[in-house]
């Protein structure tokens, strides 16, 4: 275990070494010793922090601040260690001599210094305030009592009603109920923005958004340009989807065709997924899952990965995870947003879900288990704990989405007995449904969320939050609020990630592009199948490809990994190729209809 006194001595030693010639062969050994000590202490504190966060997300009791205090204490201990002046000086000193080090050592030192920038103890009071504020915001967000017609309602139920209701007045009531948490979070969000900025500015970052982007080895300007380019490349397809939705929903609801889509018309709280607007005849997972329970869905997800040659999940996964909805009479709440957890960067892997036997959770289970098997793949001696993460942050989501996509394709579902072997389905409609999820997601993720959070941390005044939010929703999604939404609301804060996974939402946008490049490689180069209709199940050659990729962790530069495993640099081409048949169909379907979105986003 590293203690403060030895670190101080080591820090003085490295500063002295910077001013005199050190034997080249001595430095790598010294760095190894430092990294070993640092990693041992880091893993212990990280596990304690993760365990506390787990409790704060899975057992929320109104008026009970036990988990809150535990989370604050654990996160503070981790922050004090990772952001200590000794650690910062040590990492900086070694990196100044990077030409004498192995790449694996350099990668680890860079992660040490990057993590320190989020917790610099030179501004310990600010860091501690931020930790307290983040824990409080989590409690407020996930402990919120959503009300509909005077009755408590879960987010699962809100989502179900937005997918199914056809009465516009009822839909408006549900949509408005989903936004009521915003004002409760506004004050905390304003405080968090300031504290997060102050924290990273202590080590030279302009703001918290720039800090998060730097994890990709990019500037804010480069990241914004990248996201803007991908939106523009996919825009013609999104524009056709938007036009189709305006006309079809107007007919469904018996209304005039609007120029912009009213937010409460859409089957998702934020308009990020419209896939439930289309049913693919012959592919009805609701019927296939009708007599199954939630545990069966999870076990089928595990079976998929085992069929690829991965090891089974440890028994502790099922013992420690929180996989299913709480019973109606539960005296506590939990976060209903699906997530995967690598508690100790070792064998303790868990998932937080609220699985029900339906199509959404079928795909989500495969997605979340993708994260879990990713964790297991790089948890090996060759990958140091500090590099047990994706090649970049987007890679984890990309792999999850890739396996989620594979689990929904017709050939896979037929092979699993989820639909009949002789069932006929409309391939364009299947593609259409996927586009209403994936393509619709891009202007939301690369546009609304990314541009809003950039502004948020660049100094957007608190009395302009809602106006700026809806400005971007209109510009990138072509969606407008159903009623006036002034600054008494804080609709941005209703999105979980704004509060507890801040300034990183472009990860999801980039992950969709990585997903399509990886999937195209598997389909074309390994399976020899149409990327739109694959069956990964039982293909251990696919599993071997995935294992070679996943077991790298963050030991190599993500750009090199893209070239070696995804066929080239990050680009939208594979995604555009995938949806090319749909683009032609939509152009024909929308003949005679007026497009109200501009040819390119403003």
Image (cartoon, helix red, strand yellow):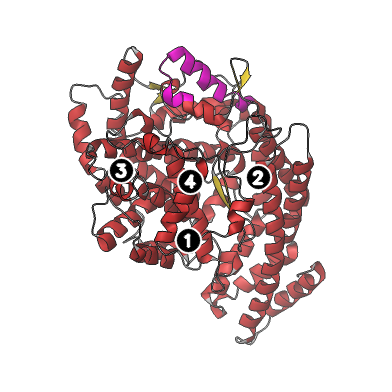
Task: Give the labeled residue for mark 4.
Answer: 296
Left or right of 40 on screen, residue 106: left
Q: Earlier in the sequence, mark 4 or mark 1?
A: 4
**For discs 4 and 1, the disc positioned in front in the rendered view:** 4
The Cα atoms of the two marked residues, 4 and 2, are separated by 42 Å
Range of magenta residues: 161-183
| Count of numbered tags | 4
User: Mark 2 sits on what residue?
Assistant: 196
Of the two numbered discs 1 and 2 in the rendering, the one whose residue sits closer to the viewer: 1
Q: Are marks 4 and 1 in contact (CB under 8 Å)?
A: no
* Number of the front mark, 4 or 2: 4
Say if mark 4 contacts mark 2, CB within 8 Å. no
Label 1 sits on residue: 391
Check disc 3 and report the residue beneath it: 233
Label 1: how many Cα within 10 Å (few below 14, some 14–19, many 20+): many
Q: Is residue 168 magenta?
A: yes
Spatial distance from mark 3 to mark 2, Cα to Cα? Answer: 33 Å
Residue ranking furthest to the right: 5
Residue located at (41% from left, 62% from top) = 559
* Chain-order first, disc 3 or disc 2: 2
Q: Secondary structure at mark 3?
A: helix
Q: Is residue 91 magenta?
A: no
Mark 1 vs 3, N-terminal side:
3
Who's the residue at 47% across and 68% down the image? Answer: 556
Q: Please state if 128 lies on the left or on the right of 543 as rendered.
A: right
Query: Circle 1 sits in a helix, a strand or a loop, which is it?
Result: loop
Q: Is residue 128 above or below residue 191?
A: below
Rendering quarter of residue 589 = top left
Q: Main secondary structure of the magenta part?
A: helix
Classify mark 4: helix, strand or loop. helix
């Amino acid at each position: 275990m590293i203690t403060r006194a030895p670190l101080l001595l080591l820090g003085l030693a490295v500063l002295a070494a910077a001013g005199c010639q050190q034997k080249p062969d001595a430095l790598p050994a010294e760095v190894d010793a430092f990294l070993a000590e640092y990693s041992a202490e880091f893993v212990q504190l990280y596990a304690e922090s993760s365990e506390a966060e787990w409790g704060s997300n899975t057992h929320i009791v109104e008026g009970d601040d036990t988990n809150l205090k535990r989370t604050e204490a654990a996160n503070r201990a981790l922050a004090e260690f990772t952001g200590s002046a000794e650690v910062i000086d040590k990492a900086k000193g070694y990196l100044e001599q990077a030409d004498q080090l192995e790449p694996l050592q350099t990668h680890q030192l860079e992660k040490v210094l990057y993590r320190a920038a989020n917790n610099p103890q030179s501004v310990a009071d600010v860091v501690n305030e931020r930790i307290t504020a983040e824990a409080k915001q989590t409690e407020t967000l996930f402990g919120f009592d959503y009300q509909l017609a005077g009755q408590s309602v879960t987010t699962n139920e809100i989502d179900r009603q937005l997918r199914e209701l056809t009465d516009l007045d009822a839909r408006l009531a549900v949509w408005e109920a989903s936004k009521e948490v915003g004002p409760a979070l506004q004050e905390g969000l304003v405080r968090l923005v300031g504290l997060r900025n102050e924290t990273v500015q202590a080590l030279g970052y302009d703001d918290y958004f720039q800090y998060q982007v730097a994890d990709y080895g990019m500037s804010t300007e480069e990241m914004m340009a990248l996201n803007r380019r991908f939106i523009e490349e996919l825009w013609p397809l999104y524009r056709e989807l938007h036009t189709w939705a305006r006309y079809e929903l107007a007919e469904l609801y018996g209304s005039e065709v609007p120029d912009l889509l009213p937010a409460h018309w859409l089957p998702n709280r934020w308009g990020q997924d419209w896939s439930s607007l289309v049913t693919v005849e012959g592919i009805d997972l609701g019927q296939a899952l009708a007599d199954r329970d939630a545990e069966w869905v999870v076990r089928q997800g595990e079976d998929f990965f085992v069929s690829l040659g991965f090891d089974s999940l440890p028994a502790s996964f099922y013992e420690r995870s929180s996989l299913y909805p709480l019973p109606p009479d539960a005296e506590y709440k939990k976060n209903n947003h699906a997530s995967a957890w690598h508690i100790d960067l070792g064998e303790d892997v868990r998932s937080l879900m609220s699985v029900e036997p339906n199509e959404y959770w079928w795909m989500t289970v495969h997605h979340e288990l993708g994260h879990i098997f990713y964790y297991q793949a790089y948890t090996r001696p060759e990958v140091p704990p500090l590099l047990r993460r994706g090649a970049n942050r987007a890679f984890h989501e990309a792999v999850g989405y890739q396996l989620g996509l594979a689990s929904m394709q017709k050939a896979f579902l037929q092979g699993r007995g989820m639909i009949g072997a002789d069932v006929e389905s409309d391939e364009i409609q299947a593609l259409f449904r996927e586009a209403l999820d994936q393509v619709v997601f891009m202007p939301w993720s690369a546009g609304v969320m990314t541009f809003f959070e950039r502004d948020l941390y660049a100094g957007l005044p608190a009395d302009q939050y809602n106006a700026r939010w809806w400005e971007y929703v209109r510009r990138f999604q072509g969606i407008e609020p159903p009623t006036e939404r002034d600054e008494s609301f804080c609709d941005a804060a209703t999105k979980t990630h704004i509060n507890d996974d801040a300034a990183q939402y472009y990860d999801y946008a980039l992950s969709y592009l990585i997903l399509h490049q990886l999937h195209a490689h598997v389909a074309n180069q390994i399976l020899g199948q149409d990327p739109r209709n694959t069956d990964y199940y039982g293909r251990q050659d696919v599993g071997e490809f995935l294992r070679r990729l996943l077991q790298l962790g963050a030991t190599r530069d993500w750009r090199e990994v893209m070239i070696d495993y995804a066929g080239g640099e990050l680009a939208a081409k594979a995604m555009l190729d995938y949806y090319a048949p749909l683009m032609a169909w939509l152009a024909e379907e929308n003949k005679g209809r007026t497009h109200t979105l501009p040819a390119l986003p403003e």
